[in-house]
Amino acid sequence: MRYFIKTYGCAANEADSERIETYLQNLGYKKAKDINTADYVVINTCMVRKSAENRVYGLINNLNKSLRIKNFELKIIVTGCMTGMAVKDKTGKFLKHLKEIFPKNVEFLPIEEIGFNIEPVRYDKTHALVPISFGCNNFCSFCVVPHSRGPEKSRPYDEILTEIKNLAQNGYTKITLLGMNVNSYGADLINSQLATRNPQTTFQLPNGKIIQPILVKHLGRTRIPTLFPYLLEDICHIKGIKEINFMSSNPWDFSDELIDVIAQNPQISRQLHLAVQSGSDRILKIMNRWYTKKEFLTLIKKIRTKIPNVSISTDIIVGFPGETEKDFVETVDLCQKAKFNKAYISIYSDRPLTFAHKNLKDNIPFPIKKQRWQILENLINKPSLKIKYLRI
């Protein structure tokens, strides 16, 4: 059997595909030269936007035209976020939908069945992707990730350190830590309720050191305990690792302690990504984002003050349901003040199972969405065109 893996989506999906490849090789399968010479096609899917979902449908539709699939000579395995959503949708409607439109010899593989204990196939011999958590607990109203990946689950602390030490011994110098929200890492490894009520609650690291979990305070209350600053610092002490990146991180869990660890350790990349999504307090509240425009800008100022050479990128959604011109102007104002180095700007995409899908009407005309996208694209990613925006 010859396999081919097609991966859509983020770095977390890429890391999942690396482990899937080892899984297939352990079954005795060989890697095909391309998708047309494969007997076994694995499609690792993304559901974050409709466009990513449509690319999956397009690929399977093209494969469905092949005589090999009609003769059951070609097997297709669908995994990743699409399968995750199908499995987790308690109504069963999404799985039924997929089975109706996909060929009969399509099978579904929940990525959780692969697990983290499989050594991934890595083609890059200096840079490694290292997942530290899986899933998300935040339920932003537009986001499908909690529905496709499930609740947040942290990998054991010592397991992560052991993997990175082994990578360093094998010549890797750069790592990227992955999670839907890396800076809440470890919250599930701690008794969260007890830690929140009693700040003296301690946690024992694998090396025997007793520490107090970092209690992130936000919006006037203690939110979660986290181990991420400790993990990040311990990774900095691993000999041979010269550069450490991490993604993604939420603004409301970006603690002062995390900023200090980054500032004090030059191995940690000075390129940080903080998704703001909107500059309007009204829209942020509907999005279920746990901060205000003022609080986000305060965080950016704090980071730039303690890490002077930092570069900050962000994610922004334009055309969210109900976004008025005034809301958009607030986003433009935030971007001008935050001085992002780069922005990944997306036009709002209605996603199944989300709060927005169930409760909000996608009522912004596409031409307006596109215009707002272009304005921010010019403002942030094409700064030489800033004067053009100021005239609009």
Image (cartoon, rainbow, N blue to C red):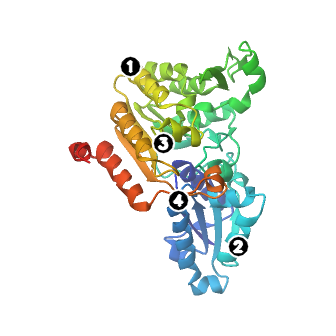
Percent position of residue 381, x then y: 31, 45
Tag 2 and tag 3, C-beta contact below 8 Å: no
Q: Earlier in the sequence, mark 4 or mark 1?
A: 4
Q: Residue at x 30, y 43 (%)?
A: 379
Q: CA distance from mark 1 to mark 3?
A: 23 Å
**What residue is pinned by disc 2?**
99
Q: CA distance from mark 4 to mark 1?
A: 37 Å
Q: CA distance from mark 4 to mark 3?
A: 22 Å
Q: Earlier in the sequence, mark 4 or mark 3?
A: 4
Question: Residue 146, can we see it?
Answer: yes
Q: Residue at x 69, y 76 (%)?
A: 100
Crowding around mark 1 (Cα neighbors within 10 Å: few <14, some 14 to 19, many 20+) is: few
Q: Amino acid at mark 2?
A: Lys
**What residue is pinned by disc 1?**
305
In the rendered structure, the answer to whether residue 371 lies left or right of residue 360 reads left
**What residue is pinned by disc 3?**
277
Q: Residue at x 37, y 51 (%)?
A: 372
Tag 2 and tag 1, C-beta contact below 8 Å: no
**What residue is pinned by disc 4?**
8
Q: CA distance from mark 2 to mark 3?
A: 34 Å
Name the front one of labels 2 and 3: 3
Crowding around mark 3 (Cα neighbors within 10 Å: few <14, some 14 to 19, many 20+) is: many
Q: Name the mark on residue 354.
A: none
Percent position of residue 226, x then y: 64, 26
Report helix, strand or loop for mark 1.
Answer: helix
